[in-house]
Amino acid sequence: MAILKYKHTHISHLTYLLTHLLNFCANSSYHRRIVVVIIASVDVSTFGTPMTPTSNRIRLDRALVDAFLTFKKNISDNTIAMAEKAFDIRSQYLSSDSRKYDPKFEEWWSEYNLDSVFGGRANFTKYAASGKVVEQAKIGGYTRQIDRLLIALAEA
């Protein structure tokens, strides 16, 4: 159990905290129940006041920048994980002449409609090729260049 004491007085800060907490729980590799208690004080003095064109705007602050950075990092981490896993699968289930997948792979692909995940077999192959590059980058110590790989994947 974690107890977080949060003293910011604006609701956007509490929303930011909850977003990060949920994001952590969703992406966590822990396989146990996570219990979190949040103690927060929120300024409710503006609740119930009439909305104006500017009162409903998203607050442009450091918390928003941090949220975008977290989104970007999660996209990067998840794309790399997909690429690595696709490479592992392709390496294990593609025939030695690289022309045909194992029947178990074909059944799995069809049963779970992986075209909807990858957008087609060609995109799966691109992810697998990218996974190979990631693996080679890790072996060669070039992990800083992996962001370029993500740009190439996004453009594919």
Image (spheres, rainbow, N blue to C red):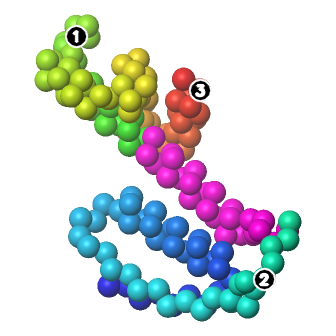
Mark 2 or mark 3, whichever is nearer to me? 2
- Name the residue that disc number 1 marks: 100
Q: Quadrant of residue 93?
A: top left
Mark identifier at residue 155:
3
Residue sitting at the far right: 53
Q: Amino acid at mark 1?
A: Lys
Dot placed on the residue nearer the N-terminal end, 2 or 3: 2
Instruction: Let me know if residue 7 is in the magenta part.
Output: no
Question: Would residue 47 appear left or right of 23 to someone viewing this image?
Answer: right
Residue 55 against residue 43 in the figure, above or below: above
- Nearest the viewer among 151 and 9 is 9
- Name the residue that disc number 2 marks: 49
Q: Amino acid at mark 2?
A: Thr
Instruction: Report, in whole angstroms, how far the alpha carbon at label 2 lies from the one at label 3.
Output: 46 Å
Instruction: Report, in whole angstroms, how far the alpha carbon at label 3 lies from the one at label 1.
Output: 26 Å
Figure quadrant of the C terminus: top right
Read off the magenta span. Answer: 54-79
Whether pointer 1 and pointer 2 mark residues with C-beta atoms closer than 8 Å, the reply is no
Question: Residue sitting at 36 percent across and 19 percent down?
Answer: 121
Q: Quadrant of residue 152?
A: top right
Q: Is residue 48 visible?
A: yes
Question: Residue sitting at 59 percent across and 26 percent down?
Answer: 155
